[in-house]
Image: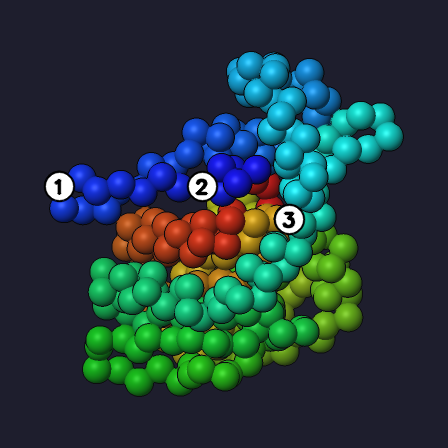
């Protein structure tokens, strides 16, 4: 099994070149099958991988011995518990702010507006990172500020993509109060907006947390398709009129997707 981990390193043109061992590549081909299949029989692994049966046999046995594959009583294979341990470590060590900040900076450079990063904290959204607008205008949002999940795009888009039961539980108990002239306080109207946000992948707010301030937000997902945060741009309402929105929406959604991909999310995954 030593060569399973082996990288052949040699010199070429004065540079060190790493050549990935073919056994490693083939082993990864086997493991990648389980990204789309929860369980596979030995014959299915052979069929889907296209790797010769004798090679598959040796690699599957080795992967099982290392804890990377698990075999049940029916002879079917699934990813081993070792992946769960690795997954927890990766999740614990990924700081959403650290991952998102470079992408937020790129978005800020493109639009010149304030860029916010929020996460859910109980029944509120918490602003955990912010890049201020280039314009000579003072916006009152700041890192550490909390807002109700129903108010403002950056908060509400998190609510929109919560599991249905959690969302309904929140809506049943929350008392919706007006914060600014545009705050939504009607629960049925909010439900319609949340449903639309799920379908289009973003939400827009106007004067919901602060008068004359608009915001566009999109959700950030993890590798399970769970919403874990949101990213938004924010500025004067006059810059967020209907005809101006499409290019801004596209930029925010692209930034959200780029951050989500850092956490293992793919567009083929449904949100959960």
At label 2, counting other C-alpha atoms closer than 10 Å, the crowd grade (few under 14, some 14-19, many 20 or more) is some
Q: Position of residue 151 (x, y in %)?
A: 55, 70
Residue designated by label 2: 6
Above or below 191: residue 232: below
Task: State the residue in front, 18 or 189.
Answer: 18
Report the residue marked by disc 1.
13
Q: How many C-alpha atoms fall within 10 Å of the one at disc 3: few (<14), some, or many (≥20)?
A: few
Q: Position of residue 124 (x, y in %)?
A: 62, 75
Q: Nearer the viewer, residue 214 or 90?
A: 90
Task: Give the label on residue 42, or none.
Answer: none
Residue at x 23% of width, y 60% of height? 110
Q: Nearer the viewer, residue 94 or 53?
A: 53
Residue 99 as seen in the image, left or right of residue 192:
left
Q: Within the image, what quadrant is residue 111 found in?
A: bottom left
Residue 39 x, y percent position in the rendering: 72, 30
- Disc 1 and disc 2: Cα gap in Å? 22 Å
Tell me the residue at 27%/75% (across/down).
Answer: 133
Q: Mark 3 points at which residue?
A: 83
Front position in the image: 3 or 224: 3
Q: Considering only order in the chain, which callout, 1 or 3, is on the residue closer to the N terminus?
A: 1
Per the image, label 3 sits on a secondary structure element best described as helix
Residue visible at 40% across and 41% down? 7
Q: Is mark 2 on a helix, strand or loop?
A: loop
């Amino acid at each position: 099994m030593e060569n399973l981990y082996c990288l052949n390193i040699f010199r070429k043109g004065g540079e060190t070149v790493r050549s990935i061992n073919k056994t490693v590549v083939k082993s990864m081909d086997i493991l990648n099958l389980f990204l789309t299949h929860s369980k596979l029989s030995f014959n299915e692994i052979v069929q889907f991988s296209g790797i010769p049966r004798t090679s598959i046999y040796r690699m599957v046995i080795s992967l099982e011995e290392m804890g990377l594959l698990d075999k049940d009583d029916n002879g079917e294979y699934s990813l081993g518990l070792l992946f769960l341990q690795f997954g927890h470590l990766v999740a614990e060590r990924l700081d959403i702010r650290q991952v998102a900040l470079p992408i937020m900076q790129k978005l800020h450079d493109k639009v010149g507006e304030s860029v916010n990063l929020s996460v859910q904290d109980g029944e509120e959204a918490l602003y955990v990172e912010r890049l201020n607008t280039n314009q000579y205008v003072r916006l009152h949002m700041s890192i550490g500020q909390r807002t109700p999940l129903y108010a403002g795009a950056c908060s509400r888009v998190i609510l929109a993509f919560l599991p249905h039961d959690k969302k309904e539980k929140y809506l049943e108990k929350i008392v919706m109060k007006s914060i600014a002239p545009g705050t939504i306080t009607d629960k049925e109207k909010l439900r319609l907006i949340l449903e639309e946000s799920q379908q289009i992948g973003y939400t827009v707010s106007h004067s919901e947390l602060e008068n004359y301030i608009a915001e566009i937000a999109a959700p950030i997902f993890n590798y399970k398709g769970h919403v874990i945060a949101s990213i938004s741009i924010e500025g004067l309402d006059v810059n967020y009129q209907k005809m101006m929105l499409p290019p801004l929406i596209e930029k925010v959604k692209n930034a959200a997707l780029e951050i989500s991909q850092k956490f293992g999310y793919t567009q083929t995954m449904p949100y959960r």
